[in-house]
Image (cartoon, rainbow, N blue to C red):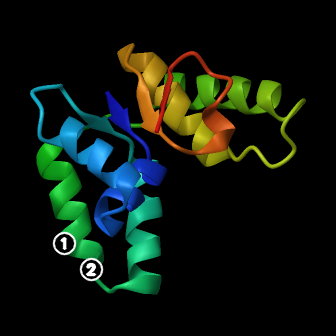
Amino acid sequence: MLIDSFAWIEYFMGTEMGVEVKQVVESDVQLYTSPIVIAEIYSKSLRTDGRAEERRNFIVKRCAVIPIDEEIAVEAAKIHAEAKKTMEDFGLADAFVLASARYKNVRVLTGDPHFEDFSESIML
């Protein structure tokens, strides 16, 4: 399972949704992340709580990082182009997360409404 930035933020904030994420993080499920997720969490932490390195280390100790390569980049472009037809604010970062999940054939744990219509999503 790939844990999206939205889910990690809820986890680190200790919200009700974060408790659901914690159950997954502490389970035996193989966890994945994308460098995009690491960048989003790192940036948010630099702007809010100054715990960027701590957060990054926590994530990479628990998740296999799926490297972004040409295949993932092309898939992300296709996802992005298609999604933009119906969601004007669908970001390329979200497309990279979905492309990474498809590459590993895993689901994405998130609460981000941009992911609602994708079969790979497990919505919090």
Crowding near the residue tagged with mark 2, few <14, some 14–19, many ≥20 C-alpha atoms within 10 Å: some
Please provide percent x and percent y for residue 45: 38, 76
68 or 95, which is in the foreground? 95
Residue 63 showing in the rendered view: no
Q: Which residue is mark 1?
A: 54
- For the point 78% across and 30% down, which residue is it? 83
Q: Quadrant of residue 41?
A: bottom left
Is there any visible trace of residue 122 in the rendered image? yes
Left or right: 24 in relation to 72: left
The label number, if any, that marks residue 24 in the structure image:
none
Label 1 close to label 2 by CB (< 8 Å)? yes
Q: Amino acid at mark 2?
A: Arg
| Quadrant of the rendered image containing residue 96 | top right
Question: In this rendering, is residue 40 above or below 120?
Answer: below
Element type where label 2 sits in the image: loop
- Kindly identify the residue that appears in the image at 37 percent across and 18 percent down: 106
Q: Is residue 34 above or below residue 107?
A: below
Q: CA distance from mark 1 to mark 2?
A: 5 Å
Q: In which image quadrant can residue 21 be found?
A: top left
Above or below for 50 versus 99: below
Front in this rendered view, residue 22 or 37: 22
Mark drawn on residue 51: 2
- Mark 1 lies on a secondary structure that is helix
Bin the neighbour count of mark 1 within 10 Å (Cα to Cα): few under 14, some 14-19, many 20 and up. few
In the picture as drawn, the residue positioned furthest to the front comes out as 16
Residue type marked 1? Glu
Q: Position of residue 65 (x, y in %)?
A: 27, 40
Residue at 19 percent of width and 72 percent of height:
54
**Point 50% across, 37% down: residue:** 97
